[in-house]
Amino acid sequence: MNPDTDTDTDTVTSAEALFYQANDLMAQGQVDAAEATLRQALVLEPDLAEVHANLAWLLKQQGRFVQAEAAYLQALRLAPDNLQIALNFAVMLAAQKRFVEAEQWYRQILAQDAGRVPAWSNLGVLLASMQREDEAEACYRQALVLAPDYRKAAFNLAYLLLRQGRYDEGWAMLEARDSLDMLQNLLQDHLPDAPSVQRWLGQDLAGKSIIILFESGHGDMIQFARYASLLKQRGAVRVSCLCHPALKRLFASLHGLDDAWAFDEDLAINDWDYWVAPLSLPGLFGTRLDNIPADLPYLHAPLQARQDLESHTDIINIAGSDLRVGLVWQGNPQFENDADRSIHTLQVLQPLAAVAGVHFFSLQKGAGELHADDDATAAMPLQLNKQLSTQLSNLAPHIHDFADAAAIIMQLDLVLTVDTAVAHLAAALGKPCWVMLPAYQPDWRWLDGRDDSPWYPGVVRLFRQDRAGDWAGVVQQVSRQLAGLAAGSGKA
């Protein structure tokens, strides 16, 4: 979801030159110089509200919330009728989960200007985050009544509708996402001399070729790559995909796909008839809850990755007869909701150590990854270090891309993960996968109130926080279910 913020550049003061110089420095990413310049302007004109506001915005971007709040409040004391400053301050309060205060500011702004479209959309984001979805929907729709082309409100409404399973309208609203603007340019950048390639919007594909462009993260691409086979069923003679480099080898196994290209390599083919955005495919195929294409598995571990793993099977075999569980606790820190969807304190996982008959294998890459030269649990803190010392093996050094991860996952009984691309990978492989979800802004694709997923029927099980931040409760629930599984068949 995308709250609207902006910097206020309306100023007529003797510090004007410094004010605009600071704005230029901010645009160039020179944060320290911009801050120094704004503070210099305030020495000259300490009562200039716009300078205080831009300083607040800059401090907020750095996570310096206490200082940013003081600057915002000073700006609002000097310019109480400046609704843009008030709007930016409310966005910061919402980012800190100070929901009651943020709502008060949004409603105060709308009381002064009921036609202020960004305030309606931002209030909707706030209410949705508080699980007041009916009120949120009303706010988004009011924004769209006032400004039918306001894309942020449409996108935010799409997020809400899709999470509720209202797919018909949700897919249509999702077409307001910003990433669509970049895709045509992306294709032209890769194929500057290619013939004109049209966007596919449902045209007849008989005898035609089409390329699925890459969009969003690895998990999105894995989830929506399933539509390649449907494009083939529509009559396409060649279906290609431009994807993240780490997905290229894996996608070679995708049913219905003729070739996969990484976005960091030159394309040897340049004569596609159409291109399509992956997140547009569900809408173009009229996907509803009752007709999701979910023939699992639709991905497979490539032969070369399986052969590469053979020399390391002794690592996996150390589990003996224990349940083999892959473990991922953090996602990409650049993701907008990563602070809530990831487990950042590994002590939270301590109850897992008490489950008998389970051996854990770390599949964690990137943030939180255990280092190859560490003891298998050297990065695990406090009690976990001892309790998991014989129960956790680090497989991350053997994972170089998603093909490697797929080969490893196929040797496991179960994958336990937070909401990351690994969840989609395991599920697309048809491997049982337990996904731990946050209460705050859970991703739309897992829907509301379900413990299963129609996108991955029979393999995904969802464990949701009862309240924001309560990973301990989720891990306790998972531990109980794991204990029962290990004491039973020993297989998920």
Image (cartoon, rainbow, N blue to C red):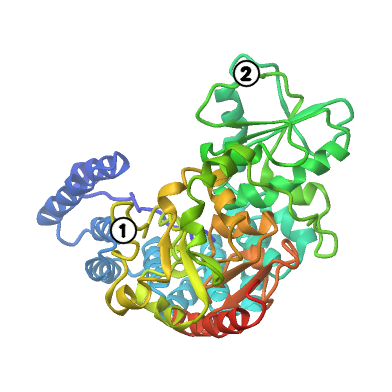
Image quarter of the C terminus: bottom right
Q: Position of residue 54 (x, y in %)?
A: 28, 55
User: Would you call the spot at circle 1 few (<14 residues within 10 Å), some (14-19), or many (20 or more)?
Assistant: many
Residue to which mark 2 is pinned: 268
Q: Position of residue 327 (x, y in %)?
A: 49, 65
Q: Position of residue 214 (x, y in %)?
A: 60, 39
Q: SS at mark 2? A: loop
Question: Toward the viewer: 299 or 128?
Answer: 299
User: Would you call the spot at circle 2 few (<14 residues within 10 Å), some (14-19), or many (20 or more)?
Assistant: few
Marker count (numbered): 2
Q: Earlier in the sequence, mark 2 or mark 1?
A: 1
Q: Identify the disc placed on residue 57.
A: 1
What amino acid type is highlighted by mark number 1? Trp
Q: Residue at x 62, y 47 (%)?
A: 221
Task: Give left or right: position of 276 versus 110.
Answer: right
What amino acid type is highlighted by mark number 2? Ala
Mark nearer the viewer, 2 or 1: 2
Q: Residue at x 58, y 56 (%)?
A: 409
Task: Give left or right: position of 360 versus 279.
Answer: left
Task: Give left or right: position of 346 versus 247.
Answer: left
Q: Residue furthest left?
A: 43
User: Is residue 131 at all visible to an observer of this figure?
Assistant: yes
Question: Toward the viewer: 434 or 84?
Answer: 434
Task: Give left or right: position of 206 versus 132.
Answer: right
Q: Residue at x 59, y 77 (%)?
A: 463
